[in-house]
Amino acid sequence: MSDAVVVEDGPAHRFEVLVDGEAAGYAAYRRTGAAISFTHTEVDERFEGRGLGSVLVRGALDAARARGLAVLPFCPFVRRYISRHQEYLDLVPANQRARFELPADDGEGDR
């Protein structure tokens, strides 16, 4: 696979994963105060099966962490990613985890 890079398109309210400069997928979001709500993730069918959805979500979650944002994973793909990569669980406020069917405890205390 060619190198993939994740960039934010702020005006469009989404993160994009680019492959050789071409948009291969996106994760749409809404910002409200100190929280970011991921609402939809999509990878173009021409790029499916390359793990780009995971690359995209990891990049978006890393950006949220770097900015100190709480994450609300309304998108099922983002929710599954967090469930499988619990190093990101602390981004979801403890009082919101049950709503997204995520574990209550990340093993490291609350945010």
Image (cartoon, helix red, strand yellow):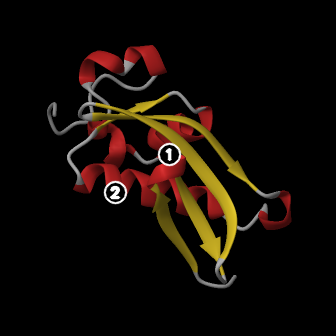
Q: Is residue 60 above or below residue 101?
A: below
Q: Farthest front residue?
A: 11
Q: Which residue is painted at 43% across and 48% down in the image?
A: 85
Residue bearing the label numbered 2: 63
In the displayed structure image, the side of residue 50 where residue 53 appears, left or right: left
Using the image, determine if residue 99 lies above or below residue 87. Answer: above
User: Residue 72 appears at what percent x and percent y?
Assistant: 40, 30
Quick one: label 2 or label 1, which is nearer the N terminus? 1
Label 1: element kind: loop
Q: Which mark is residue 104?
A: none
Q: Nearer the viewer, residue 75 or 81?
A: 75
Residue 31, position as x, y percentages in the image: 37, 35
Q: Position of residue 42 (x, y in %)?
A: 70, 48
Q: State left or right for residue 85 relative to residue 52.
A: left
State the CA–CA distance, disc 2 to disc 1.
Answer: 13 Å
Q: Estimate how packed mark 2 is, as few (under 14), some (14 to 19) or many (20 or more) residues with alpha carbons within 10 Å.
A: some
For the residue marked with disc 1, what is the amino acid?
His
The answer to the question of whether label 2 and label 1 lie on touching residues, with beta carbons closer than 8 A, is: no
From what the image shows, is residue 74 above or below residue 54? above
Residue type (three-letter) at the residue carrying disc 2: Ala
Give the residue displayed 45% in from the left and 41% down from the top: 82
Secondary structure beneath disc 2?
helix
Residue 62 picture quarter: bottom left
Q: In the shown orientation, is residue 77 left or right of residue 101?
A: right
Q: Quadrant of the N terminus?
A: bottom right
- Please name the residue that numbered disc 1 is placed on: 13
Q: Is residue 12 left or right of residue 108?
A: right
Q: Position of residue 111 (x, y in %)?
A: 16, 34
